[in-house]
Amino acid sequence: MKKAYRKICFTGIVLAVLLAGCGGENGTDAADRGGDSSAQETAELLTEEDGSETSRIVFECQDMEGNTVSASVFTQSKLTMVNVWATYCNPCLSEMPGLGELAGEYEPDEFQIIGIISDVQEGGDAAVLDNAAALIEQTGADYTHLLLNESVYYALLTDVAAVPTTFFVDENGVVVDTVIGAMEKSAWEEKINALLEES
């Protein structure tokens, strides 16, 4: 009973926060909006060569196919784009075809895209999962999509106030940039290429 109550409370809090804002078409860096550029709470610190410490994302959850995915997924590419979206969010859905195209245009060891479905919880209702799967298929967003659980929420979503929100994560699991709102494919491509050059 306690576990079910906790799950209901967690779902209610997350939905209340995310329903409060569905980002518009123009993406902005979190820093441009006065926010912290790394919206994360983390369990590990990475020590840099200069002795400074950087937060590293740590999580474990399931993807749409029921596979377990952890933060080790970031080690597979130099740069990972983590796109937080929701099934009710039109700007999210409108940018997903372009993201699906981008996912296939880069070498996997250079760049990958991961989606987090912010309103579909791990272990949730089959009809809700089927709706999310249909939207992914319709938009051609053929990349890994993660289901929400407490681990992912506390690792990445605690400061997310609107969807879509997109994080760029390096191969060490460190957030290097954040964009709030949707963008056209060409604008994403420009940002991706610039971040890859910097890495």
Image (cartoon, rainbow, N blue to C red):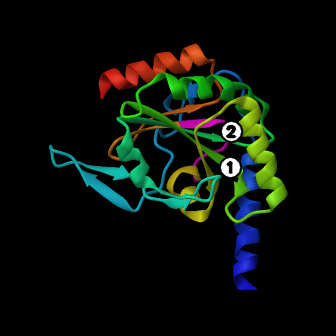
Q: Amino acid at mark 2?
A: Val
Q: Residue furthest right?
A: 127
Q: Measured from the top left, where is residue 150 in percent x and y?
A: 59, 64
Around disc 2, counting alpha carbons within 10 Å, would you say few (fewer than 14), some (14 to 19), or many (20 or more)? many
Q: Is residue 136 magenta?
A: no
Q: Classify 10 Å Cα crowding around label 1: few (below 14), some (14-19), many (20 and above).
A: many
Instruction: Give the residue drawn at x 54%, y 21%.
Output: 188
Q: Which residues are magenta?
A: 158-166
Q: Quadrant of residue 137?
A: top right
Residue sitting nearer the eye, 50 or 113: 113
Q: Residue 162: give x, y in percent of width and height.
A: 68, 40
Real-space Cα distance between discs 2 and 1?
Answer: 8 Å
Residue 165 drawn at (x, y percent): 61, 37
Q: Is residue 61 above or below residue 132?
A: below
Task: Decide if residue 132 is on the left or right side of residue 61.
Answer: right
Mark 2 near mark 1, Cβ–Cβ under 8 Å?
yes
Task: Name which residue lies at 15% across and 44% down.
Answer: 49
Q: Which image quarter is the N terminus in?
A: bottom right
Which quadrant, please, contains the C terminus? top left
Q: Secondary structure at mark 2?
A: loop
Q: What's the mark number on residue 163?
A: 2
Q: Nearer the viewer, residue 19 or 107?
A: 107
Q: Nearer the viewer, mark 2 or mark 1?
A: 1
Up-down relation of residue 54 to residue 109 (above or below)? below
Query: Image height check: is 3 above or below 84?
Result: below
Q: Position of residue 78 (x, y in %)?
A: 35, 35
Q: Is residue 160 magenta?
A: yes
Q: Could you tell whether 191 is left or right of 158 in the image? A: left
Q: Quadrant of residue 184?
A: top right
Which residue corresponds to mark 1? Answer: 118
